[in-house]
Amino acid sequence: MKIKKNKEQILKEIDKYDKLPEKEIEKNLKKYNAEKLISALKQGEEYFSKFTGYKDIISLMDYCKIYGIKVLFSPTIVRGLSYYNGTVFEIKAKGIKETIIAGGSYIFNNVQCTGISFGLERLLPLAKLKTEKEKYIVVSLNQDREAIKLAQKLRGRGKSCMIYYGKPSKALDYANSNSIQNAIFIGEKEIKAGKFNVKDLKTGKETILKI
């Protein structure tokens, strides 16, 4: 079927295909007399092979195969075709429903380009980063300036360090919930002595840190 009017609105509705129930998509398309598109979208990849634009998809798949990247054709990915003028794509990963990387082809300054965007907050749970750095929490007992100075010195030694300005009891709760093993309390007494007690929150043992 050929669509002459409301193309952008129709494409936006199709882009919601994996986000809304099919009946709702069909109802929205009916406003533009385009509800028959649903049956076309469900006919499979072979149906779309007759269109000229599908040749670009085949070419992309061939190149991706060389790099060992698996590509699946989806006729419902739109990503705002008023901006893009060619192939658009989305990258997904196991363990997360949302798209983590997406992009497509477009023209910028009369040059054909391809761009991508990353969802950092979606990538972080997948990264599973581990750090070997010792973690410290510096608890300020009304000695904020000195707490900052000590934290900076610890960071300079390659330690992972944060400063807590609230109640000591809440600082320990925070440390335990965030797997921070070492706690340093900074008060007037410690500053005068120039020595700071480092408490191992797992064993309860204390050692003296000299700066």
Image (cartoon, rainbow, N blue to C red):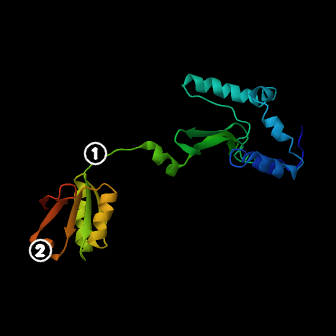
Residue type, numbered disc 1 = Glu
Q: Nearer the viewer, residue 47 or 2?
A: 47
The residue indicated by pointer 2 is: 192
Q: In the figure, 169 relative to 103: above or below? A: below
Residue 147, picture quadrant? bottom left
Q: Residue at x 28, y 58 (%)?
A: 161
Q: Residue at x 71, y 49 (%)?
A: 20
Question: Which structural element holds mark 1?
Answer: loop
Could you tell me which quadrant the N terminus lies in?
top right
- The tag on residue 113 is none
Give coordinates of residue 52: x percent, y percent.
80, 29
Specify few, some or many for label 2: CA neighbours under 10 Å numbering under 14, 14-19, or 20 or more.
few
Q: Is residue 142 left or right of residue 9?
A: left
In front: label 1 or label 2: 1
Specify few, some or many for label 1: CA neighbours under 10 Å numbering under 14, 14-19, or 20 or more.
few
Give coordinates of residue 184: x percent, y percent.
21, 64
Give coordinates of residue 41: x percent, y percent.
78, 36
Residue 68, picture quadrant? top right
Residue type, numbered disc 2 = Lys
Q: Are marks 1 and 2 in contact (CB under 8 Å)?
A: no
Q: In the figure, 206 relative to 132: above or below? A: below
Question: Which structural element holds mark 2?
Answer: helix
Give coordinates of residue 195: x percent, y percent.
11, 66
Q: Is residue 130 left or right of residue 73?
A: left
Q: Nearer the viewer, residue 73 or 64?
A: 73
The residue indicated by pointer 1 is: 132
Q: Nearer the viewer, residue 98 or 21?
A: 21
Q: In the figure, 161 relative to 10: above or below? A: below
Residue farthest left in this picture: 193
